[in-house]
Each structure stands twice: as C-alpha cells, then as structure tokens.
Amino acid sequence: MNISKVWGVSFSPTKTSKKIVDAIASGIPGVERNSLDLTYPGKIEARTFKPEELVVIGVPVYAGRVAPLAVQRLKAIKGKTTPAVLVVLYGNREYEDALIELRDIAIRASFLPVAASAFIGEHSFSSSQIPIAPGRPDSVDLASAASFGRKVFKNISQLQDVSSLSCLQVPGNIPYKESMGPLPITPKVNQTACTHCGMCISTCPAGAITIDDALIMDVERCIFCCACIKTCPEDAVSIDAPPLQEKRLWLHENCAKRKEPELYY
Ligand SMILES: Cc1cc2nc3c(=O)[nH]c(=O)nc-3n(C[C@H](O)[C@H](O)[C@H](O)COP(=O)(O)O)c2cc1C
C-alpha cells in the first residue's frame, strides 16, 4: 500500500516520547511528515487520520500503564482503518501493561496497529544526584528508532491492504494492572530562587501551575511528570517528599542495568 503522509503524535511532558516518535518518523523515507503534540492544554487539535496516512503514536508509561492524562488526550485522535505504529517510553523499570493498553486504545479509535515498541527514556524522577536511565534515549536508541521506522514502512509498502493483518500481539495482561492513584504531594517551589519567568507554567501538561504573588501548584491537577523541575532554569522546583524520594532511590539502586528497546511487528 502507498502511504501519503506520516504523522508523529505524542503526549510527552519531558520529551522522551516525542524524541522517539520523531526518530521513528525520520526513518521513513520520501514521505511528507507532520506532527501533532497532545501535551499542552489549549493547544490540542482533534483529528481523524486518513486510511492512507501512517500515524506513529508515543506516550509515557506511568505505573505500568499508559499515563492517565495521555489516555484522556488520545481521545482527540481517530483513525479510519489508519495504520499506526505504537510506542511507549518507560524509565528503565518495566512497562508492564502499557503497550497492550495503548494497542487497545488505538484499536478502539479505529487505527490498525501494524507495529509496536517499548523504548527507554530518562526517568521523570531522575536527577543529577540520583540518576535513573540518564540521557536516554541516547544516540543508539534514536538510531534504533529510525531503523524501526524504516523497517515498518518497508513492510507496509509490500502489503496490498493492511486491513487483512491479524491483531498485533504485544506483551501485557488483560485485565490491566491497577492504574496509579492520586498522590497527596506536588513539587515545591523555592520562592526566593523563582524569578517568575513562567517556563514551568507553559511546560506543565496539566495546567497545574498558576502565578499570583508566588507560584502555586495545584495538588489535584499535578501528574508528577516533573516537566516543571526539568525546565526551571533556576533549579527552583523540586519534589523530595518522602514517598517520591524513596521511590527515586529505589529506582536508582534497582533499575541501573541498561534495558534495550523491544520491537514488535
Ligand atoms: C508518575 C510516573 C510514573 C512512572 N511509572 C513508570 C513505570 O511504571 N515504569 C517505568 O519504567 N518508568 C516509569 N516512569 C518514567 C517514565 O515512563 C519515563 O521517564 C518516560 O520516559 C517519560 O516520558 P516523557 O519524557 O515523554 O514524559 C514514570 C514516570 C512518572 C512521572
């Protein structure tokens, strides 16, 4: 079949999912490329993709599932038996039921999953003092993503019609494991160091940060993605509350061995 356009669709607070989606799309030769970012509230564009387009969909793993806010944002996109390449990004622990959940979301939205993958991204909770998969995806991961894109495209080009493909098998369990619940914590702001530059506000995917005389974090909205922490040019935002600091240390000690991308066709 002929593909007229490749779309990279991502929800990606700390940009690792977006990097891999873009790298997969970059491996696809000679076809117009476009992207749709579902990360930021107020900038989300609903779209139904055509049967002859190819859509690469990337989201992060939170607690072994698709990040709950990504599940909400993915409701903006639909296919029309549109071939889709799925990708979950995880922080070198496990991705558990996230890839099968993403496959099922894609099928329900009338996409046809033709390939899927799990890549590793620097863990959102990683810091320079307590690194977890620092610098991932690195150049090796990006090369692997581009080569995956090339191979998927070659496979699709050789098919008459993707709708005859059987359901793509990926790891994971149904019913899925329980999703993460709310946590009674938010990042803390060092109000003395904060210059009110607003970068954290524009990078927060949940619209959880507002500014009055001081920066205010909304505990109900915060999804703990840590985009504000990674973006702040003054290092004025941190999240060191006990449950999160314990988790960070556990991940640092127990998930240090490098994992490699997994690809499914
Ligand atoms: C609340 C939360 C839960 C997470 N749960 C997992 C997990 O279960 N397994 C894992 O390996 N990484 C986990 N991560 C790490 C992210 O999946 C990883 O950093 C991913 O690359 C982030 O994607 P993004 O850069 O597109 O935001 C979690 C991150 C957050 C913020």
Image (cartoon, rainbow, N blue to C red):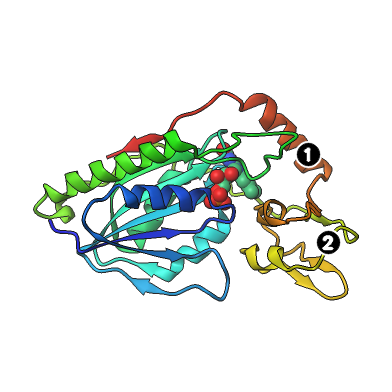
User: Residue shown at 40%/57% (left/top)?
Assistant: 105
Vertical side of 84 occupied by 48: above or below: below
Between disc 1 and disc 2, the foreground one is 2
User: Residue shown at 83%/45% (left/top)?
Assistant: 241
- The secondary structure type at the circle numbered 1 is helix
Vertical side of 139 occupied by 5: above or below: below
**Of 81 and 10, the residue lying toward us:** 10
User: Residue shown at 42%/66% (left/top)?
Assistant: 36
Give the quadrant of the N terminus. bottom left
**Of 32 and 83, the residue lying toward us:** 32
**Of 174 and 39, the residue lying toward us:** 39
Residues at discs 1 and 2 in contact (Cβ within 8 Å): no
Q: Position of residue 64 (x, y in %)?
A: 55, 42
Q: Position of residue 158 (x, y in %)?
A: 11, 47
Give the quadrant of the C terminus. top left
Vertical side of 103 occupied by 71: above or below: below
Q: Where does label 1 land, which residue?
A: 245
Q: Where does label 2 land, which residue?
A: 194
Q: Left or right: where does residue 51 sit relative to residue 77?
A: left
User: Which residue appears farthest toward the left when viewing the image?
Assistant: 160
Q: Is residue 58 visible?
A: yes
